[in-house]
Amino acid sequence: MTTKAFLIHEGTKMSNAVELVAVSTFRSVADAHIAQGILDEIGIESIVRSDNAGGMYPALAGADLLVRADDVEKANEALHRRHQRSK
């Protein structure tokens, strides 16, 4: 799944539109944030996308972890390595 979005950098200055790709979908926002931390450690910017109606319907859980299209391979490798170590 890909999505076009504007990323905000340096206060309110916006960069050009970039293609974002969901590298993984998680059962909860918390799990997605843990994976986001893994990517942060290796310098990959990411965004957690979730829609649970503003917290009104937590049962609609599930969250996508989005990265730039250029970072997909590196992000997948990092998440896969982490998953292998946790087994």
Image (cartoon, helix red, strand yellow):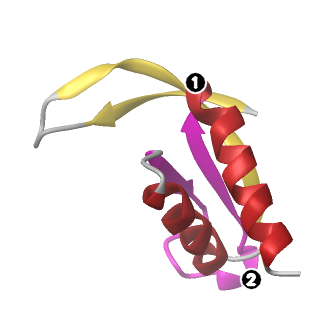
Residue 36 % position (x, y): 53, 62
Residue occupying the far top of the picture: 16
Against 85, residue 14 (above or below) is above
Which residue is at 42% across, 48% downward?
Answer: 43
60 left or right of 42?
Answer: right
The answer to whether residue 59 of the structure is visible from this angle is: yes
Can you say which quadrant of the picture contains the C terminus? Answer: bottom right
Q: Nearer the viewer, residue 80 or 45?
A: 80
Q: Which mark is residue 70?
A: 1
Amino acid carrying mark 1 in the image: Asp
In the image, residue 10 lies in the stretch drawn in magenta: no
Left or right of 35, for residue 76 = right
Q: Is residue 20 above or below residue 82?
A: above
Q: Nearer the viewer, residue 75 or 30?
A: 75
Q: Position of residue 14 (x, y in %)?
A: 22, 27
**Residue 46 as seen in the image, left or right of residue 13:** right
SS type, badge 1? helix
Whole-percent x and y of residue 41?
Answer: 45, 60
Q: Nearer the viewer, mark 2 or mark 1?
A: 1
Q: Is residue 25 left or right of residue 36?
A: right
Q: Which residue is mark 2?
A: 59
User: Would you identify the image quadrant in which residue 30 lies?
Assistant: bottom right
Q: Which of disc 1 and disc 2 is earlier in sequence?
A: 2
Residue type (three-letter) at the residue carrying disc 2:
Ala
SS assignment at label 2: helix
Tell me where the magenta segment starts and ends, as one range.
Answer: 45-68
Q: Position of residue 46 (x, y in %)?
A: 49, 48
Please identify the quarter of the rendering in which residue 16 is found.
Answer: top left
Up the image or down, 74 lies above or below 80; here it is above
Q: Is residue 59 magenta?
A: yes
